[in-house]
Amino acid sequence: MYSHLSIERFHIRQFTEGKEEQLSPNAVKSRLSRGRQIPEEPDPIRTCFQRDRDRIIHSKSFRRLKHKTQAFIAPLGDHYVTRLTHTLEVAQIARTIARALNLNEDLTEAIALGHDLGHTPFGHVGEDVLNELFPGGFKHNEQSLRVVELLEKDGRGLNLTWEVRDGIVRHSKSSKGVILGEGWGDVGTIEGEVVKISDAVAYINHDIEDAIRAGVITGADLPTEAVETLGSRHSQRVNTMVSDIIVSSWDVRVSDIIKERPAIRMSQPAIAAAEALNDFLFKRVYDMRSARKETIKAREVVRFLYFYYMNNEDKLPPEYRLRNDTTERRVVDYIAGMTDQFATRTAKELKKKK
């Protein structure tokens, strides 16, 4: 078995970096990365983006995603999407698009795997409660960046490259009803744009399937115009949207340098269909959650935990108490990192002690 030192003579990383020169001129080359906040010696085997991907996968925050809600809280069934399976679906869709457009797959994958690390327990319900309570407001994409820059590894963070951090913090849309266009928001790399649109493709389609599985809607309820454009089945819709993105964004692949950076796009018919499905989900699924018993209970859990720890800061784990932050910030960091199960269990135990 080769030691870390002896393997350097094989120049594996340099060989991979050399192959990246064949990527689209609009792709980010790992050797040209803007680098890390704390400089490090290059890895002999992995490029900087491959290294980032591995750090994310091996992080505690990534593991906790398996017990965090996507759309439905505490569903009775094994086949509902969790925040982890959503993340894997985004990564799969994003890599497919990146490969077709000759972009940097490693960078795309790293952004996709890290984009939701800061999501709260109970999905967007938990996010909404923390946004209401925390004086500075709360957004899961900003918390994801905080996770990789500070909270992971006992306050040292993961020290990821600028490109991955940029893609993570900019993956979220600035307007809930927008799939592309005004209100979409800027991303620093084409690969980051791929992840951003892949996130929408993934959640629109798997949230439809979960809503059907939960009996909230039926397939016949979906907007007719969207079904006619994208298809009636999950696989048809995903395939149609991914194919449309690739065809509409084909100029990203071109060999000649373009003065104005091209963008990841969808055709107007596909955008209209996707936005129709998105609007439908908000009206029939997302906006109706507030009346559900599980949602009410989840809101109560997050609110209880917030005020309990605000009044009992000494009960926070030591790694949160030692940070040079406000009490509100420490409490939010702790709650945001919880899984659904841990938040529910902790609230129950604390109430018994009161």
Image: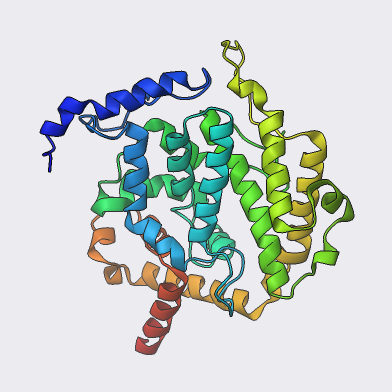
Residue found at the far right of this picture: 224
> Measured from the top left, where is residue 189 in percent x and y?
51, 28
Question: Which residue is at a point 80% across and 57% down the rendered structure image?
Answer: 232
Question: Which residue is at a point 12% across and 43% down the rendered structure image?
Answer: 1
The answer to whether 69 is drawn above or below residue 110 in the figure is below
Regarding residue 201, the answer to whether it shows in the image is yes
Q: Nearer the viewer, residue 203 or 322?
A: 203
Question: Which residue is at a point 59% across and 22% down the rendered structure image?
Answer: 253
Regarding residue 323, the answer to whether it shows in the image is no
The quarter of the picture where the C terminus appears is bottom left
Relative to residue 326, is residue 95 drawn left or right? right
The answer to whether 41 is drawn above or below residue 262 in the figure is below
The answer to whether 107 is drawn above or below residue 26 in the figure is below
Question: Which residue is at a point 49% across and 41% down the rendered structure image?
Answer: 169
Q: Nearer the viewer, residue 296 or 106?
A: 106
* Occupied quadrant, residue 107: top left
